[in-house]
Image: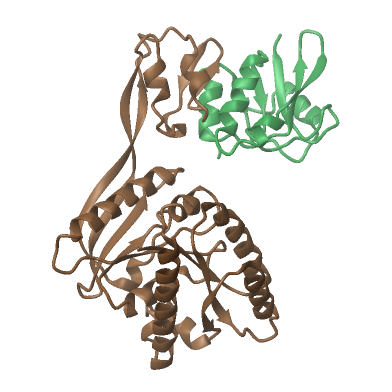
Amino acid sequence: MRIAIASGKGGAGKTTVSASLAQVWNTPAILVDADVEAPNLHLFCAPAITSSTSTFLEVPILDATACTQCGTCREVCRFMAFAKLGKTISLFPEMCHGCGGCIALCPEKALAPGQRLLGTLECGTAMGGKHAFLMGRSRIGEAMTPPQLRALQKKLELLLAQSKTTAQPYTDALIDAPPGVSCPAMTVAQEADIILLVVEPTPFGIHDFTLAHRAFLPLQKPIAVVMNRAGIPGNAGDMELAAYCQQQGLPILGLLPFSQEIAGHYAQGGIAATCSSTWEKHFTHLRDTLQAFAAKELANA
Amino acid sequence: MSKIAISSEGPGLTSMVDPRFGRAGGFVVFDTANSATSYIDNGASQVLGQGAGIATAERMAEANVEIVLSGYVGPKAFQALQAAGIKICQNIDGMTTGDALHHFQAGNVPFAEAPNK
């Protein structure tokens, strides 16, 4: 079961929930940091990294001596990787999304496949060997994350498949998803079996959560909610969020109270579930409700 | 004789300079041959997720612009304008397009050799 822990708003608590669920998860899992632009799950899960590989996107290389400036590449490209500037066609490989159309259609064979470095994938184990760990990291300056995320997902599928023949296969993937509702978040959400939305019941948090909910709904995946920072003094959002979830048929699987104690613990690199026995119970409860929700949804699927 | 394009928030020489090149609302084009001004709408580039600078540079090349006056020109836009043989003056902001043109014609604005954004 692939569980994407997503949010809409950044800073809602995705990594807090991911690390804590990993802490209390009762079967071997693969912890995945899919926030490739700013991965931070490793700061909490203390992974032992055993392999690091580079990821690439196929982009065209232009042989200017063979190019007749016919403009076919510019017509086929949707992403401005080719521009007609004066009489010449110029190539901007950093704009390329890697579809390969220009290389296939160039009548002069002036375009050949080359590579653009996307970033790295790091693998290992975490939490004293209890779980596997997989993290993607984008190259600094790389603007596109979906190709890097697809490489990460391919690696995740490989790890899940490989583990099936072992004595203790990984049953689940806990995926710390990217924030927002644009391509990075959607790329991760669409490959998940379950989407757990971490929601902060502030006006900003609820606004972005509803955007995320509306963005993910067409994927037709089971979606559930965990409310983080519940009970902020003077904030009326808890009831508003509960009402929205009830109206939309979204189960709220857990309530994590607003707490200065947990903020301090987290700021020092602590996993919320290890802060106290009370906090551990919050997350074992969330784990149980999440596993029950997933079992029910996947049985009906 | 040359065509000078100034990134602009509006269509005339009294409009304020739009300091963004790639995502400028439009360009006031002054033709030194006949002192006529025209306007190029750049709204199509404003809605692009990526590649606005390159698309805008293409638009400049199509219009046979030879000199661009703007605030900030990004690296890809700069490269594209150079490929098109268009000269670039940047760091222009907080004035009307007419004032920007006067500054340029008075020789107060140097041509840029590298992007400033």
Residue ID at (69%, 23%): B107
| Rendered position, A65 above or below B81 | above
Residue B11 x, y percent position in the rendering: 82, 28
Residue B5 x, y percent position in the rendering: 71, 22
Closer to us: B75 or A46:
A46
- Quarter occupied by the C terminus of chain A: bottom left
What is the quadrant of residue B77 in the picture? Answer: top right
Residue ID at (56%, 52%): A218
| Rendered position, A15 above or below B93 | below
| B48 to the left or right of B17 | left
Tint applied to chain A in the drawing: brown
| Rendered position, B7 above or below A37 | above
Closer to us: A294 or B28:
A294
Residue ID at (78%, 37%): B95
Residue ID at (80%, 34%): B96
Closer to us: A26 or A301:
A301
- The answer, for residue A17, to whether it is visible in the render is yes
| A3 to the left or right of B115 | left
Colour style of the rendered protein structure = by chain
Specify the farthest residue to the bottom. Answer: A277
Tint applied to chain B in the drawing: green
| B16 to the left or right of A20 | right
